[in-house]
Image: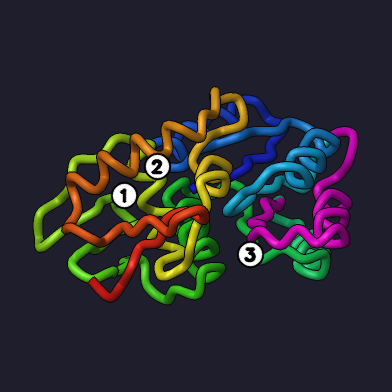
Amino acid sequence: MRILIVEDEPTLQLQLAQSAREAGYAVDVASNGLDAHFQGDTESYDAVVLDLGLPQMDGITVLRKWRAAGCTMPVLILTARDGWHEKVSGIDAGADDYLTKPFHMEELLARLRGLIRRAGGHASSELVCGPLTMDMRNSRAIVDGQALTLTSHEYRLLAYLMHHRDEVVSRSELVEHIYAQDYDRDSNTVEVFIARLRKKLPPGLIATVRGLGYRLSTSV
């Protein structure tokens, strides 16, 4: 799963990005509204953390431009403690949730998980597909009670398939959602990760749909 963090304060941006990466996300960052608008308009994200007090273009304007352009990714806005009017403006502009500074990183990550989960139509932080369970809160994949050992890219790929289980997902879509923007993206490595995952998962769980991509099937 891939997220965009938009925060102009360098220390907080670094903390947010590090915590999100440790939680298993591919992370892009932006430090001003112009860059944020461009990245959200041209890249694929599963969620965005958006500070409202940004240089060059404020967060509310960025959000309104995204929504006007048809960008539907979930957006969590960050507001000042006394900025109740910002919360209202953010929700009206199309935000899905808000968090008031200062905040605990665990709460931000929990809200992110909730946004991504609801966007995929899932009610629980535990996603189940046949014998496979993914505990999104603790970044674990479990088969028949045994935790799997996964690399960061294997985890992101499997998490994306789990959020879209029973759907056909193309290689290009997987590339867009498991790599950060500055990563050397190679669609051929998706096949390598799929092959590795198949060795760790029950047979037939990940199906190849010829010419289209892959599907995680709940019928196995």
| Residue wearing tag 1 | 139
Could you tell me which quadrant the C terminus lies in? bottom left
- Contact (CB < 8 A) between labels 1 and 2? yes
Q: Residue at x 71, y 45 (%)?
A: 51
Residue 58's label in the rendered image is: none
Under circle 2, the secondary element is loop
| Residue wearing tag 2 | 24
**Percent of width and height locating residue 178:** 49, 41
- Contact (CB < 8 A) between labels 2 and 3? no
84 sits left or right of 151 in the view: right
Instruction: Residue 207: say if magenta.
Output: no
Sequence-wise first label, 2 or 3: 2
Q: Residues within 10 Å of mark 3 (few under 14, many from 20)?
A: some
- Contact (CB < 8 A) between labels 1 and 3? no
The foreground one among 17 and 69 is 69
**Percent of width and height locating residue 134:** 29, 59
Sequence-wise first label, 1 or 2: 2
Q: How far, Cα to Cα, is label 1 from label 3?
A: 22 Å
Q: Residue at x 55, y 25 (%)?
A: 183
73 sits left or right of 173 in the view: right
Q: Indicate which label's residue lies in the foreground, 1 or 3.
A: 1
Residue type at tag 2: Gly
Whether residue 90 is situated above or below residue 196 in the rendered picture: below
Q: How far, Cα to Cα, is label 1 from label 2?
A: 7 Å
Stretch of the chain drawn in magenta: 55-79
Residue type at tag 3: Asp
| Residue wearing tag 3 | 97
Q: How far, Cα to Cα, is label 2 from label 3?
A: 21 Å
Q: Residues within 10 Å of mark 2 (few under 14, many from 20)?
A: many
Under circle 3, the secondary element is strand
Q: Residue at x 66, y 58 (%)?
A: 73
Q: Residues within 10 Å of mark 1 (few under 14, many from 20)?
A: some
